[in-house]
Amino acid sequence: MDRRDYTKIRVGLGYDVHPFEEGRELFLGGIKIPFDKGLKGHSDGDVLIHAIADALLGASALPDIGYFFPVDDKSIEGIPSTIILEKVRDLLKEKGVNIINIDCTIIAEEPKIMPFRDKIIKNLSSILRIPEDCLSVKATTNEKLGFIGKKEGIAVFAVALVSY
Ligand SMILES: Nc1ccn([C@@H]2O[C@H](COP(=O)(O)O)[C@@H](O)[C@H]2O)c(=O)n1
Ligand SMILES: C[C@@]1(CO)OP(=O)(O)OP(=O)(O)OC[C@H]1O
């Protein structure tokens, strides 16, 4: 039998980075995090959701987030990234893709993310309609090294495993 006759198990990688900007609110995983700055972006700058969206799209052999939400589309300026994630969820459903699990690492010198972990996981689980134990959100500093170490922004790596 051709091995492609089996159910496909596919992994996807997502990475995103956004610089801090004064006068904006900070959203991570759709949760407002108390902090004196937010993240710059054409959307609300939710770097965690963007990395997760790209991991899911990649695993599903679909084009990336910028294909569905172009940065030059003025009509989506300031769009909540939760809407982006809902669209990704629906695209996967149309293709018959099931999410097995998602693991993420947020790289940020500040603020502390772990106090908000449970809220973030609950929110992502509700948007994606997957059990909370299919989601993992971790955080680390960059040990003061580079642009993240200098507190200039936040980066996120996400991996997603799916089947279809
Ligand atoms: N923005 C962050 C960064 C880290 N954490 C938590 O602190 C732990 C230690 O971080 P190191 O970079 O020193 O390894 C890390 O494991 C996280 O639990 C955080 O909450 N928010
Ligand atoms: C989310 C989108 C929406 O235009 O814009 P940004 O918020 O700038 O985020 P980024 O990860 O830089 O690019 C992806 C875009 O699709």
Image (cartoon, helix red, strand yellow):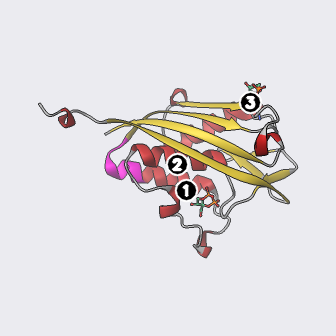
Mark 3 lies on a secondary structure that is: helix
Q: CA distance from mark 2 to mark 3?
A: 21 Å
* Residue annotated with mark 1: 84
**Number of numbered discs visible in the structure rendering:** 3
The front one of 93 and 71 is: 71
First in sequence: mark 1 vs mark 3: 1
Amino acid residing under circle 3: Met
The front one of 145 and 76 is: 145
- Which mark is drawn over residue 53? 2
x, y percentage for residue 143? 79, 31
Amino acid residing under circle 2: Ala
* Residue annotated with mark 3: 114
Q: Is mark 1 within 8 Å of ligand 2?
A: yes
Q: CA distance from mark 1 to mark 2?
A: 8 Å
The N terminus appears in which quarter of the rendering? Answer: top left
Q: Is residue 40 above or below residue 157?
A: below
Mark 1 lies on a secondary structure that is: helix
Label 3 CA crowd tier, 10 Å (few <14, some 14–19, many 20+): some
Q: Is mark 3 within 8 Å of ligand 1?
A: yes
Mark 2 lies on a secondary structure that is: helix
Q: CA distance from mark 1 to mark 3?
A: 24 Å
| Dominant SS type (magenta) | helix
